[in-house]
Image: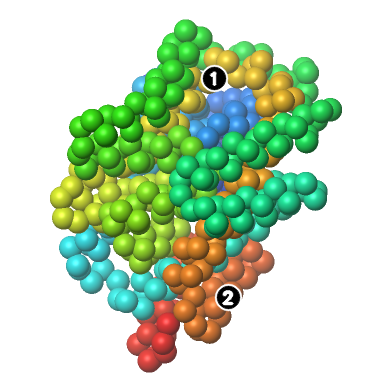
Amino acid sequence: MHSPWQVFWIFLRLGLTSFGGPVAHLGYFRDEFVQRRQWLTERSYADLVALCQFLPGPASSQVGMALGLLRAGMPGALAAWLGFTLPSALVLALFGLGLAAGATVLSAGALHGLKVVAVAVVAQAVWGMARSLCVGRARVTLMALSACAVLLWPGVWAQVGVMLVAGGVGWWLFGRGGAALPAHAPSLAEDGLHVPVRRRTGAVLLLMFAALLVLLPLAVSLWPGMLLALFDAFYRVGALVFGGGHVMLPLLQAVVVPPGWVSADAFLAGYGATQAVPGPLFTFAAFLGAAMAPWPGGWIAALVCLAAIFLPSFLLVAGALPFWEPLRRSASAQAALAGVNAAVVGLLLAALYDPVWTSAILGAADFELALLAFVALVFWRVPPWAVVLASGVAGALLAHGGQVF
Protein backbone atom coordinates (compact mmCIF):
# COMPACT_ATOMS: atom_id res chain seq x y z
CA MET A 1 0.00 0.00 0.00
CA HIS A 2 1.12 3.54 -0.74
CA SER A 3 0.49 6.87 0.97
CA PRO A 4 -3.00 8.37 0.65
CA TRP A 5 -1.31 11.79 0.58
CA GLN A 6 0.41 10.88 -2.67
CA VAL A 7 -2.97 9.91 -4.10
CA PHE A 8 -4.54 13.15 -2.83
CA TRP A 9 -1.96 15.49 -4.40
CA ILE A 10 -2.08 13.71 -7.76
CA PHE A 11 -5.87 13.88 -7.90
CA LEU A 12 -5.87 17.48 -6.66
CA ARG A 13 -3.80 18.47 -9.67
CA LEU A 14 -6.20 16.55 -11.90
CA GLY A 15 -9.14 18.27 -10.21
CA LEU A 16 -7.62 21.64 -11.07
CA THR A 17 -6.92 20.85 -14.72
CA SER A 18 -9.42 18.20 -15.93
CA PHE A 19 -11.81 20.17 -18.10
CA GLY A 20 -14.15 18.61 -20.62
CA GLY A 21 -16.54 16.31 -18.79
CA PRO A 22 -16.56 12.62 -17.83
CA VAL A 23 -15.20 11.17 -21.07
CA ALA A 24 -12.32 13.65 -21.04
CA HIS A 25 -11.64 12.79 -17.38
CA LEU A 26 -11.18 9.14 -18.29
CA GLY A 27 -8.64 10.23 -20.88
CA TYR A 28 -6.77 12.32 -18.32
CA PHE A 29 -6.73 9.35 -15.91
CA ARG A 30 -5.42 6.99 -18.57
CA ASP A 31 -2.63 9.38 -19.48
CA GLU A 32 -1.67 9.91 -15.82
CA PHE A 33 -1.94 6.41 -14.39
CA VAL A 34 -1.44 4.06 -17.33
CA GLN A 35 0.98 5.97 -19.55
CA ARG A 36 2.90 8.22 -17.16
CA ARG A 37 2.94 6.55 -13.76
CA GLN A 38 2.24 2.98 -14.90
CA TRP A 39 0.14 2.19 -11.83
CA LEU A 40 -1.77 -0.37 -13.91
CA THR A 41 -1.87 -1.77 -17.42
CA GLU A 42 -4.16 -0.77 -20.25
CA ARG A 43 -6.33 -3.86 -19.85
CA SER A 44 -6.72 -3.39 -16.08
CA TYR A 45 -7.72 0.22 -16.63
CA ALA A 46 -10.30 -0.93 -19.17
CA ASP A 47 -11.66 -3.34 -16.54
CA LEU A 48 -12.14 -0.51 -14.06
CA VAL A 49 -13.82 1.72 -16.63
CA ALA A 50 -16.20 -1.12 -17.58
CA LEU A 51 -17.13 -1.69 -13.93
CA CYS A 52 -17.82 1.97 -13.27
CA GLN A 53 -19.91 2.35 -16.41
CA PHE A 54 -22.00 -0.62 -15.29
CA LEU A 55 -22.69 0.93 -11.85
CA PRO A 56 -24.98 3.91 -11.29
CA GLY A 57 -23.19 7.14 -10.52
CA PRO A 58 -20.49 9.37 -12.06
CA ALA A 59 -18.20 7.00 -13.96
CA SER A 60 -15.10 9.21 -13.94
CA SER A 61 -15.27 9.88 -10.19
CA GLN A 62 -15.84 6.18 -9.56
CA VAL A 63 -12.79 5.27 -11.64
CA GLY A 64 -10.81 7.75 -9.55
CA MET A 65 -12.10 6.17 -6.33
CA ALA A 66 -11.22 2.69 -7.62
CA LEU A 67 -7.70 3.80 -8.55
CA GLY A 68 -7.23 5.31 -5.10
CA LEU A 69 -8.60 2.15 -3.49
CA LEU A 70 -6.25 -0.13 -5.41
CA ARG A 71 -3.30 2.15 -4.64
CA ALA A 72 -3.82 3.01 -0.96
CA GLY A 73 -6.88 1.17 0.34
CA MET A 74 -9.99 2.87 1.70
CA PRO A 75 -8.05 6.03 2.72
CA GLY A 76 -6.75 6.19 -0.84
CA ALA A 77 -10.28 6.06 -2.28
CA LEU A 78 -11.30 8.94 -0.01
CA ALA A 79 -8.14 10.90 -0.89
CA ALA A 80 -8.76 10.44 -4.64
CA TRP A 81 -12.35 11.66 -4.32
CA LEU A 82 -11.43 14.63 -2.15
CA GLY A 83 -8.58 15.78 -4.37
CA PHE A 84 -10.55 15.48 -7.60
CA THR A 85 -13.72 17.06 -6.19
CA LEU A 86 -12.46 19.87 -3.95
CA PRO A 87 -11.50 22.56 -6.53
CA SER A 88 -14.78 22.65 -8.46
CA ALA A 89 -16.88 22.14 -5.31
CA LEU A 90 -15.35 25.22 -3.66
CA VAL A 91 -15.81 27.41 -6.73
CA LEU A 92 -19.43 26.35 -7.26
CA ALA A 93 -20.29 26.71 -3.57
CA LEU A 94 -18.96 30.27 -3.61
CA PHE A 95 -21.02 30.98 -6.73
CA GLY A 96 -24.13 29.60 -5.04
CA LEU A 97 -23.51 31.65 -1.89
CA GLY A 98 -23.24 34.76 -4.00
CA LEU A 99 -26.56 34.09 -5.74
CA ALA A 100 -28.28 33.27 -2.43
CA ALA A 101 -27.04 36.53 -0.90
CA GLY A 102 -28.40 38.49 -3.83
CA ALA A 103 -24.93 39.57 -4.81
CA THR A 104 -24.39 40.62 -8.38
CA VAL A 105 -21.92 37.85 -9.06
CA LEU A 106 -22.81 38.04 -12.72
CA SER A 107 -25.08 40.37 -14.65
CA ALA A 108 -28.56 39.20 -15.64
CA GLY A 109 -27.39 38.89 -19.23
CA ALA A 110 -24.37 36.80 -18.29
CA LEU A 111 -26.54 34.52 -16.16
CA HIS A 112 -28.91 34.06 -19.06
CA GLY A 113 -25.95 33.29 -21.30
CA LEU A 114 -25.04 30.47 -18.90
CA LYS A 115 -28.60 29.15 -19.14
CA VAL A 116 -28.47 29.25 -22.93
CA VAL A 117 -25.13 27.42 -23.12
CA ALA A 118 -26.65 24.67 -20.96
CA VAL A 119 -28.85 23.91 -23.99
CA ALA A 120 -25.77 23.35 -26.14
CA VAL A 121 -23.99 21.28 -23.48
CA VAL A 122 -26.96 18.97 -22.90
CA ALA A 123 -27.57 18.70 -26.65
CA GLN A 124 -23.92 17.69 -27.09
CA ALA A 125 -24.35 15.02 -24.42
CA VAL A 126 -27.50 13.67 -26.12
CA TRP A 127 -25.75 13.68 -29.48
CA GLY A 128 -22.66 11.85 -28.27
CA MET A 129 -24.46 9.33 -26.06
CA ALA A 130 -27.06 8.52 -28.71
CA ARG A 131 -24.36 7.76 -31.28
CA SER A 132 -22.74 5.17 -29.00
CA LEU A 133 -25.64 3.86 -26.90
CA CYS A 134 -28.57 3.94 -29.33
CA VAL A 135 -27.30 1.87 -32.25
CA GLY A 136 -30.09 0.11 -34.14
CA ARG A 137 -33.84 0.57 -34.39
CA ALA A 138 -34.66 -1.17 -31.11
CA ARG A 139 -32.45 1.09 -28.98
CA VAL A 140 -33.53 4.24 -30.80
CA THR A 141 -37.16 3.26 -30.17
CA LEU A 142 -36.42 2.63 -26.49
CA MET A 143 -34.81 6.06 -26.29
CA ALA A 144 -37.79 7.80 -27.90
CA LEU A 145 -40.39 5.96 -25.78
CA SER A 146 -38.43 6.71 -22.62
CA ALA A 147 -38.29 10.42 -23.46
CA CYS A 148 -42.04 10.51 -24.14
CA ALA A 149 -42.83 8.64 -20.92
CA VAL A 150 -40.91 10.95 -18.60
CA LEU A 151 -42.36 14.03 -20.29
CA LEU A 152 -45.88 12.65 -19.79
CA TRP A 153 -45.23 11.54 -16.20
CA PRO A 154 -42.54 13.81 -14.71
CA GLY A 155 -40.89 12.93 -11.42
CA VAL A 156 -37.99 10.95 -10.01
CA TRP A 157 -39.86 7.68 -9.52
CA ALA A 158 -41.27 7.75 -13.06
CA GLN A 159 -37.73 8.12 -14.34
CA VAL A 160 -36.55 5.22 -12.20
CA GLY A 161 -39.46 3.11 -13.41
CA VAL A 162 -38.61 3.88 -17.04
CA MET A 163 -35.02 2.73 -16.50
CA LEU A 164 -36.15 -0.49 -14.81
CA VAL A 165 -38.60 -1.29 -17.60
CA ALA A 166 -35.95 -0.50 -20.21
CA GLY A 167 -33.53 -2.84 -18.42
CA GLY A 168 -36.10 -5.64 -18.61
CA VAL A 169 -36.76 -4.92 -22.28
CA GLY A 170 -33.02 -4.90 -22.96
CA TRP A 171 -32.60 -8.24 -21.22
CA TRP A 172 -35.46 -9.70 -23.29
CA LEU A 173 -34.34 -8.23 -26.63
CA PHE A 174 -30.58 -8.52 -26.41
CA GLY A 175 -30.00 -11.26 -23.85
CA ARG A 176 -30.83 -14.12 -26.18
CA GLY A 177 -27.45 -14.61 -27.78
CA GLY A 178 -26.27 -11.13 -26.75
CA ALA A 179 -22.54 -10.55 -26.60
CA ALA A 180 -20.83 -10.86 -23.23
CA LEU A 181 -17.33 -9.84 -22.34
CA PRO A 182 -14.63 -12.25 -23.49
CA ALA A 183 -14.51 -15.47 -21.48
CA HIS A 184 -10.79 -15.05 -20.91
CA ALA A 185 -10.75 -11.33 -20.21
CA PRO A 186 -7.79 -10.49 -17.96
CA SER A 187 -8.42 -9.92 -14.28
CA LEU A 188 -6.91 -7.28 -12.03
CA ALA A 189 -5.04 -10.00 -10.14
CA GLU A 190 -3.34 -11.15 -13.36
CA ASP A 191 -1.78 -7.70 -13.61
CA GLY A 192 -0.49 -7.84 -10.06
CA LEU A 193 -3.18 -5.61 -8.54
CA HIS A 194 -4.70 -6.44 -5.18
CA VAL A 195 -8.24 -5.46 -4.21
CA PRO A 196 -7.90 -4.52 -0.50
CA VAL A 197 -11.56 -5.33 0.23
CA ARG A 198 -12.79 -8.78 1.20
CA ARG A 199 -15.98 -10.15 -0.25
CA ARG A 200 -17.62 -10.07 3.18
CA THR A 201 -16.77 -6.37 3.55
CA GLY A 202 -17.95 -5.73 0.01
CA ALA A 203 -21.28 -7.41 0.77
CA VAL A 204 -21.70 -5.24 3.88
CA LEU A 205 -21.02 -2.07 1.85
CA LEU A 206 -23.53 -3.08 -0.85
CA LEU A 207 -26.09 -3.86 1.84
CA MET A 208 -25.45 -0.45 3.40
CA PHE A 209 -26.02 1.17 -0.01
CA ALA A 210 -29.42 -0.53 -0.38
CA ALA A 211 -30.40 0.03 3.26
CA LEU A 212 -29.79 3.78 3.04
CA LEU A 213 -31.85 3.96 -0.14
CA VAL A 214 -34.81 2.38 1.69
CA LEU A 215 -34.37 3.75 5.20
CA LEU A 216 -33.58 7.40 4.51
CA PRO A 217 -37.11 8.22 3.20
CA LEU A 218 -38.55 6.51 6.30
CA ALA A 219 -36.25 8.54 8.53
CA VAL A 220 -37.38 11.75 6.84
CA SER A 221 -41.04 10.87 7.47
CA LEU A 222 -40.34 10.05 11.14
CA TRP A 223 -37.97 12.94 11.90
CA PRO A 224 -38.77 15.80 9.51
CA GLY A 225 -35.82 18.08 9.07
CA MET A 226 -34.38 20.04 6.18
CA LEU A 227 -30.83 18.66 6.35
CA LEU A 228 -32.05 15.06 6.57
CA ALA A 229 -34.43 15.69 3.66
CA LEU A 230 -31.54 17.12 1.64
CA PHE A 231 -29.33 14.14 2.43
CA ASP A 232 -32.11 11.75 1.39
CA ALA A 233 -32.84 13.59 -1.86
CA PHE A 234 -29.23 13.87 -2.98
CA TYR A 235 -28.34 10.34 -1.89
CA ARG A 236 -31.25 9.05 -3.99
CA VAL A 237 -30.05 10.99 -7.04
CA GLY A 238 -26.50 9.70 -6.61
CA ALA A 239 -27.78 6.15 -6.24
CA LEU A 240 -30.08 6.16 -9.26
CA VAL A 241 -28.14 8.03 -11.96
CA PHE A 242 -27.04 5.82 -14.83
CA GLY A 243 -24.92 7.24 -17.61
CA GLY A 244 -22.77 9.88 -15.94
CA GLY A 245 -23.01 13.41 -14.66
CA HIS A 246 -25.23 14.93 -17.35
CA VAL A 247 -28.02 12.48 -16.57
CA MET A 248 -28.37 13.85 -13.03
CA LEU A 249 -29.94 17.00 -14.52
CA PRO A 250 -33.55 15.75 -14.73
CA LEU A 251 -33.29 13.89 -11.41
CA LEU A 252 -31.90 16.88 -9.52
CA GLN A 253 -34.33 19.26 -11.15
CA ALA A 254 -37.20 17.07 -9.99
CA VAL A 255 -36.06 17.08 -6.35
CA VAL A 256 -34.90 20.69 -5.82
CA VAL A 257 -37.02 22.93 -8.06
CA PRO A 258 -40.65 21.82 -7.36
CA PRO A 259 -40.24 22.14 -3.54
CA GLY A 260 -38.81 25.63 -4.03
CA TRP A 261 -35.38 24.80 -2.59
CA VAL A 262 -33.76 26.39 -5.66
CA SER A 263 -35.42 28.46 -8.38
CA ALA A 264 -35.47 27.17 -11.96
CA ASP A 265 -33.37 30.14 -13.12
CA ALA A 266 -30.74 29.58 -10.44
CA PHE A 267 -30.72 25.85 -11.22
CA LEU A 268 -29.91 26.36 -14.89
CA ALA A 269 -27.43 29.18 -14.19
CA GLY A 270 -25.60 26.90 -11.77
CA TYR A 271 -25.63 24.03 -14.23
CA GLY A 272 -24.16 26.29 -16.88
CA ALA A 273 -21.46 27.44 -14.45
CA THR A 274 -20.64 23.81 -13.68
CA GLN A 275 -19.55 23.39 -17.29
CA ALA A 276 -16.93 26.12 -16.86
CA VAL A 277 -15.04 24.46 -13.99
CA PRO A 278 -12.82 21.37 -14.05
CA GLY A 279 -13.57 18.18 -12.15
CA PRO A 280 -16.74 16.08 -11.82
CA LEU A 281 -20.16 17.38 -12.81
CA PHE A 282 -21.62 16.03 -9.57
CA THR A 283 -20.06 18.99 -7.73
CA PHE A 284 -23.15 20.82 -9.02
CA ALA A 285 -24.61 19.53 -5.74
CA ALA A 286 -22.34 21.92 -3.82
CA PHE A 287 -23.80 24.85 -5.76
CA LEU A 288 -27.37 23.74 -5.09
CA GLY A 289 -26.77 23.37 -1.36
CA ALA A 290 -25.05 26.74 -1.10
CA ALA A 291 -27.74 28.50 -3.18
CA MET A 292 -30.56 27.50 -0.82
CA ALA A 293 -31.42 30.49 1.30
CA PRO A 294 -31.94 31.20 4.09
CA TRP A 295 -31.15 28.33 6.51
CA PRO A 296 -30.12 25.62 5.89
CA GLY A 297 -28.49 26.97 2.75
CA GLY A 298 -24.81 27.81 2.79
CA TRP A 299 -21.67 25.86 3.56
CA ILE A 300 -23.43 23.26 5.72
CA ALA A 301 -26.01 22.45 3.06
CA ALA A 302 -23.32 22.43 0.37
CA LEU A 303 -21.32 19.87 2.36
CA VAL A 304 -24.40 17.73 3.08
CA CYS A 305 -25.50 17.70 -0.57
CA LEU A 306 -21.99 16.99 -1.83
CA ALA A 307 -21.36 14.12 0.60
CA ALA A 308 -24.82 12.63 -0.01
CA ILE A 309 -24.60 12.58 -3.82
CA PHE A 310 -21.15 10.92 -3.82
CA LEU A 311 -21.69 8.45 -0.96
CA PRO A 312 -23.51 5.86 -3.15
CA SER A 313 -20.56 5.82 -5.55
CA PHE A 314 -18.10 5.14 -2.73
CA LEU A 315 -20.22 2.30 -1.34
CA LEU A 316 -20.84 0.76 -4.76
CA VAL A 317 -17.24 0.89 -6.00
CA ALA A 318 -15.73 -0.51 -2.80
CA GLY A 319 -18.52 -3.08 -2.50
CA ALA A 320 -18.55 -4.26 -6.11
CA LEU A 321 -14.81 -4.58 -6.80
CA PRO A 322 -14.50 -7.96 -5.00
CA PHE A 323 -17.38 -9.39 -7.06
CA TRP A 324 -16.52 -7.83 -10.43
CA GLU A 325 -14.86 -10.81 -12.11
CA PRO A 326 -17.91 -13.14 -12.41
CA LEU A 327 -20.34 -10.27 -13.03
CA ARG A 328 -18.47 -8.73 -15.93
CA ARG A 329 -18.77 -11.97 -17.93
CA SER A 330 -22.58 -12.11 -17.64
CA ALA A 331 -24.40 -11.77 -20.95
CA SER A 332 -27.68 -11.03 -19.14
CA ALA A 333 -26.19 -8.11 -17.22
CA GLN A 334 -24.73 -6.62 -20.40
CA ALA A 335 -28.07 -6.99 -22.21
CA ALA A 336 -30.04 -5.29 -19.43
CA LEU A 337 -27.50 -2.48 -19.33
CA ALA A 338 -27.96 -1.91 -23.06
CA GLY A 339 -31.65 -1.20 -22.45
CA VAL A 340 -30.92 1.03 -19.46
CA ASN A 341 -28.40 3.04 -21.47
CA ALA A 342 -30.94 3.67 -24.23
CA ALA A 343 -33.44 4.89 -21.61
CA VAL A 344 -30.77 7.14 -20.12
CA VAL A 345 -30.38 8.93 -23.45
CA GLY A 346 -34.17 9.31 -23.56
CA LEU A 347 -34.20 10.89 -20.10
CA LEU A 348 -31.53 13.35 -21.16
CA LEU A 349 -33.42 14.13 -24.37
CA ALA A 350 -36.54 14.89 -22.32
CA ALA A 351 -34.48 17.13 -20.02
CA LEU A 352 -33.11 18.96 -23.07
CA TYR A 353 -36.68 20.01 -23.84
CA ASP A 354 -37.92 20.61 -20.29
CA PRO A 355 -36.52 22.37 -18.30
CA VAL A 356 -33.44 23.32 -20.32
CA TRP A 357 -34.94 24.50 -23.63
CA THR A 358 -38.22 25.87 -22.28
CA SER A 359 -36.44 27.99 -19.65
CA ALA A 360 -33.55 29.28 -21.73
CA ILE A 361 -34.66 29.69 -25.35
CA LEU A 362 -36.95 32.71 -25.24
CA GLY A 363 -36.26 34.20 -28.65
CA ALA A 364 -34.22 34.13 -31.85
CA ALA A 365 -31.09 35.52 -30.16
CA ASP A 366 -31.16 32.70 -27.61
CA PHE A 367 -31.48 30.07 -30.35
CA GLU A 368 -28.62 31.63 -32.34
CA LEU A 369 -26.32 31.65 -29.31
CA ALA A 370 -27.20 28.06 -28.39
CA LEU A 371 -26.66 26.92 -32.00
CA LEU A 372 -23.24 28.58 -32.21
CA ALA A 373 -22.26 27.06 -28.88
CA PHE A 374 -23.37 23.60 -30.04
CA VAL A 375 -21.36 23.89 -33.28
CA ALA A 376 -18.31 25.06 -31.32
CA LEU A 377 -18.57 22.12 -28.92
CA VAL A 378 -19.38 19.33 -31.37
CA PHE A 379 -17.68 20.27 -34.63
CA TRP A 380 -14.91 22.71 -33.69
CA ARG A 381 -13.99 20.77 -30.52
CA VAL A 382 -13.66 23.99 -28.52
CA PRO A 383 -13.11 23.21 -24.80
CA PRO A 384 -16.43 23.39 -22.91
CA TRP A 385 -15.09 25.89 -20.37
CA ALA A 386 -14.17 28.27 -23.21
CA VAL A 387 -17.62 27.94 -24.79
CA VAL A 388 -19.29 28.58 -21.43
CA LEU A 389 -17.22 31.68 -20.72
CA ALA A 390 -17.79 33.00 -24.24
CA SER A 391 -21.56 32.47 -23.90
CA GLY A 392 -21.62 34.32 -20.59
CA VAL A 393 -19.77 37.26 -22.15
CA ALA A 394 -22.06 37.17 -25.20
CA GLY A 395 -25.11 37.19 -22.95
CA ALA A 396 -23.82 40.21 -21.06
CA LEU A 397 -22.95 42.09 -24.26
CA LEU A 398 -26.28 41.37 -25.91
CA ALA A 399 -28.17 42.44 -22.80
CA HIS A 400 -26.10 45.62 -22.56
CA GLY A 401 -26.78 46.37 -26.21
CA GLY A 402 -30.51 46.28 -25.64
CA GLN A 403 -31.20 42.89 -27.11
CA VAL A 404 -34.11 41.06 -25.53
CA PHE A 405 -33.27 37.52 -24.37
The secondary element bearing badge 2 is classed as: helix
Q: Where is 342 relative to 265, above or below?
A: above
Q: Quadrant of residue 309?
A: top left
What label sits on residue 293 in the rendered view?
Answer: none
Residue closest to the far left:
295
Q: Quadrant of the N terminus?
A: top left
Q: Where is 76 relative to 137, above or below?
A: above
Q: Residues within 10 Å of mark 1 (few under 14, many from 20)?
A: many
Image coordinates of residue 2 in percent, x first then y, are 42, 19
Observer able to see residue 27: no
Image coordinates of residue 367 in percent, x first then y, are 54, 78
Residue type marked 2: Leu
Looking at the image, residue 12 sits to the left or right of residue 362; the answer is: left
What label sits on residue 321 in the rendered view?
Answer: 1
Q: Where is 363 relative to 218, above or below?
A: below
Which badge, 2 or 1, is on the more N-terminal residue? Answer: 1
Image coordinates of residue 83 in percent, x first then y, are 37, 37
Image coordinates of residue 102 in percent, x first then y, are 19, 67
What residue lies at 47% left-to-right and 14% top-to-bottom?
202
What residue lies at 23% left-to-right and 71% top-to-bottom?
104
Between the residue at mark 2 and the residue at mark 1, the CA separation in whole angstroms equals 43 Å
Residue closest to the far right:
177
Q: Nearer the viewer, residue 306 or 48?
A: 306
Q: Nearer the viewer, residue 39 or 293?
A: 293
* Residue that numbered label 2 is attached to: 372
